[in-house]
Image: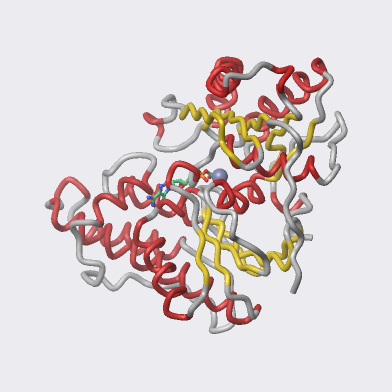
Amino acid sequence: MPTEKLLFPPGPVLGIETSCDDTAAAVVDGGRVLASVVSSQAEHLPFDGVVPELASRAHVRLIGPVVREALAGAGLGWEDLAGVAATHAPGLIGSLLVGLTYAKAAAAARGLPFVGVNHLEAHLLSVLLTRDDVRPPLVGLLASGGHTEIVEAREWFRYRILGSTRDDAAGEAFDKTAILLGLGFPGGPAIDRAARDGDPAAIPFPRAWLGPDSLDFSFSGLKTAVRNFVAAEGGPEAMPPARTADVAASFQEAVVEVLATKTLLAAERAGVSTVVLAGGVAANRALRSRLEAACADRGWSFAVPELRYCGDNGAMVALAGALRLARGERSNWDLPAVPTLLQTSFGS
Ligand code: KG4
Ligand code: ZN
């Protein structure tokens, strides 16, 4: 099937990302990252989770310096840009508004084209920051702190959601489980690290398959199983490090097995042989290697972003914005910030 060739605008594009707790900006030119700055907010650490009002305030403080640093890193001024892009959905409403409003104001003041970007589309397209051989038709697993979606793209820019989580997102499950184990926040990297020394088969935690045909996910039962297990051991402080490592590895195995199995099933059913893994949880080593090996076994192509582009970043937003600007797309100045995925066109 012929697939659309991706075009870039004739110049660099600034991308701004403030949908959650990272203030990020980057400049991308013709698919190449000239500069990428991510400021991860430390103010949430004492709370074991993101506090929306603190996130918005930190974005207000950081957005100017982060954008200036990205432009300086690229060695460019506003006059050199071909356009400005910012995440407008989904995410925390106050956080989204900071980056979106900044981007609109800067573009309007400088007479630059502006386009709003969907955060999940940006994650999916982030594989193109390091590889230019990824083509639809494809199935993508987008797993982050806020979302867990299996999407099908028969062509770029048109997506169909095949499966979603019914409760916690995969990254949220990692974060909550890490707290139960006393490993701190954010939990994904902490569990990934702890699991290295553990036995993934030590504890048979439950897998929520939700029926043989379902491509949906549920992680709340698994989290409860870990909570009960840790309580029965006398709490996280009573557990020796080797036991904590076994719980982390067994929990991770349960998540990875379900994520990988359903993604492969979705690709089989859709009749596609390209699988993309993206979003913050794509940094997980067990998940990356499981999907990579399974795709290799089937003779399929597997694409995952470099580690630095798995978590939230401005480069993926600049890239998605650049591709949309090159198609002649422009957003109106009244483009709203939209908190939930359901109200966006991502699934249409
Ligand atoms: O995409 P992202 O940076 O922000 C959202 O859009 O939510 O994803 C953040 C999520 C967090 O829940 C974090 O714990 C998880 O990605 N994460 C990981 C790993 N690194 C980050 N989860 C599992 N293993 C990792 N190595
Ligand atoms: Zn994200």
Q: Nearer the viewer, residue 48 or 155?
A: 155
Q: Residue 186: x and y, percent?
A: 39, 41
Quadrant in which the C terminus appears = bottom right
Q: Residue at x 59, y 63 (%)?
A: 140
Quadrant in which the N terminus appears = bottom right
In this view, 294 is above or below 146 = below
Quarter where residue 325 is shown: top right
Task: Please indicate whether residue 2 sits to the left or right of residue 302 in the image.
Answer: right
In this view, 155 is above or below 338 = below
Q: Residue at x 12, y 52 (%)?
A: 240
Q: Nearer the viewer, residue 296 or 194?
A: 296
Task: Please indicate whether residue 346 sits to the left or right of residue 235 in the image.
Answer: right
Q: Residue 8: x and y, percent?
A: 73, 43
In this view, 151 is above or below 271 = above
Q: Residue 78: x and y, percent?
A: 71, 18
Quarter where residue 288 is shown: bottom left
Q: Residue 40: x and y, percent?
A: 46, 29
Q: From where the camera sits, is residue 57 visible?
A: no
Q: Residue at x 39, y 59 (%)?
A: 223
Residue most extreme to the bottom: 212
Task: Please indicate whether residue 200 sits to the left or right of residue 84 in the image.
Answer: left
Quarter where residue 3 is shown: bottom right
Q: Residue at x 27, y 49 (%)?
A: 193
Task: Please indicate whether residue 236 sits to the left or right of residue 62 in the image.
Answer: left
Q: From where the camera sits, is residue 73 visible?
A: yes
Q: Nearer the viewer, residue 107 or 133?
A: 133
**Which quarter holds ligand 2?**
top right
